[in-house]
Amino acid sequence: MKINVIRLSNSLDPHASFKHDGDAFIEEINNELFDKDFELVENDESALFNVIFIETGGSEQHFLKIERELPRPIILLSDCLNNSLPACFEIKSFLANNNEDCILLFGKEKDIASALVEISRISQAQKLINNANLGVIGKPSDWLIASMVDYDEVKRVFNVNLIDITSKELKMEINKGLLENIPLKDKFAKFYKDEKVLQGALEIYSGLKRIIERYKLTGLTIRCFDLIEEYQNTACLALAMLNDEGIIATCEGDVPSMLSMLLIKAACDKPSFQANPSRITFGNENEDNIALFAHCTIPLSMTSKYEFMTHFESGLGIGIRGKLNLGQVTIFKLSRNLKDYLLISGEIKDNPTLSNYCRTQISVKLDDEDLYPLINKSYGNHVIISYGDNISDIANVLHYYHERLNKK
C-alpha cells in the first residue's frame, strides 16, 4: 500500500543539500516499510493517506497554502535537519490553536515506519466507518434500559448515520415470501429438515437484504423478538448469514453493540460474536476464573461446526449452536455515551452445551485484571467477542475518535 509524501521546503541554500538529506531519509523509512508491504511515494493521489514532510525551516507559509485541502488528521514528518523540527512545532501549534488534529512523526526511521503502519490501519478503519449507514429496525428491545444512544453524538464523533426503520417496513418485505440468491440454502436444507421453519428464516434474511439495499446499509440492529409472535420464527439465522457477508448485524436493537461490532470490523477486519455474559465463576488457587458467554446467533465463519436448534427463550424458529475454536479472544463493548468502553482479553477453554442458556456457549478463562472490568464495565447485557489479540488495534482506533469526542 502506498503513502503519499508531500515535501515542503523554503531553503536559502543554493546547493539545496536538504533535498539529498530528504531523499536519504525517505529511502531509509521505505527500507523499514518494505516487509510490511507499505511504501512512501510522491505525487500519488491514489495513496492511502498523505504525510507532509517539512524539510526545512520557513515552510510554514507553504503549508498554509495547502492546509485547507488536506484530509484530517494532518500528519507531519520531520528528519530533524535544516530546522525541520521547529517548523513542525510551529505548524502543530497553529493547528492546535484552530482545534485541528495533528500527528507529528520524527526520530528513528524504524519507529516512524511502525507509526505509519499504525496510522494506515486507522486510516483504513476511518474509510469503513466514515458516513456509514446503520439501520435501527424497530427500536431497541424494552429490556435495553441502559443502552440508548444520542444519534447526534454518534454522527458528530464517528460520522455514522443511524437510520430508524420501522418493523412494519421489514414485515412488508418478509411477507413478500421472496427468496433471492440465498447462500448455503441447499446445504441448510440437507441437515435441517423442517422446510417450513427454514423457509421462514430465509424469508427474514431475504427481507433484511432488501432493506439493506434500499438504505445502503453497512450494518443493522433489529428488534428481533417482535418477529417471534408474528412469524413463530427468529432472525438468528439471518443475522449469522449477514455477518458472514461482512454486514454488521446485531440483535435486540442494541445500538452500542452494533457500533462495537463496526469498530472491530474497521480496526481488524474480523467477524465477531454478540453474546450475553451469562454466568461468572470465581476461581481460586486451583481453578481459573471462568465466564460463560452465550447467544443464539453467531457468524457461521467463526465456528468449526454448527447445528440448528430452536431459539432458546421461545423454543421457536432457528437458533444456532456453534462450536468455536479454543484460544485467545478479545472482548469489547462501547458504552452508550461513546466515551467509555470495556476492552479485555480472554481464552476460550470449552464449548459447553448447558441447558437454561442460549444455544452457542463458550467458557472463557479470564485473569483477575480482566474479570473485574467485565463486572464493573459491562455496559449492558451484551459484549462483542472476536478471535485473537485485537486490543491494540481497537484501542488505537478508539483513541483517534476519543480525541474528537473530547473536543466538544
Image (cartoon, rainbow, N blue to C red):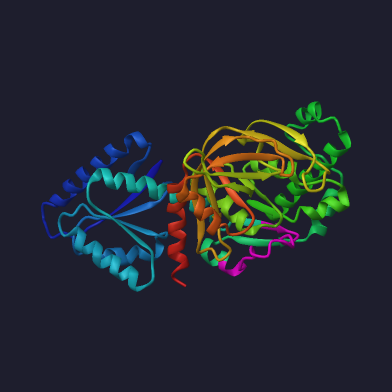
Q: Residue at x 74, y 44 (%)?
A: 356
Left/right placement of residue 403 relative to residue 51 reads: right
Provide residue 300's location: percent of width, then percent of height: 66, 36
Left/right placement of residue 198 relative to residue 92 reads: right
Q: Residue furthest top?
A: 190
| Residue in front for this viewpoint, 272 or 364 | 364
Provide residue 101's location: percent of width, then percent of height: 38, 64
The reply to whether the magenta stretch includes residue 233 is no
| Residue in front for this viewpoint, 253 or 108 | 253
Magenta-drawn segment: 135-153
Question: Does residue 299 appear in this view?
Answer: yes
Q: Quadrant of residue 151?
A: bottom right
The reply to whether the magenta stretch includes residue 142 is yes
Left/right placement of residue 373 relative to residue 253 reads: left
Q: Residue at x 40, y 62 (%)?
A: 69
Q: Residue furthest left?
A: 14
User: Principal SS element in the magenta part?
Assistant: loop
| Residue in front for this viewpoint, 339 or 289 | 289
Q: Up-down: is 336 above or below 234?
A: below
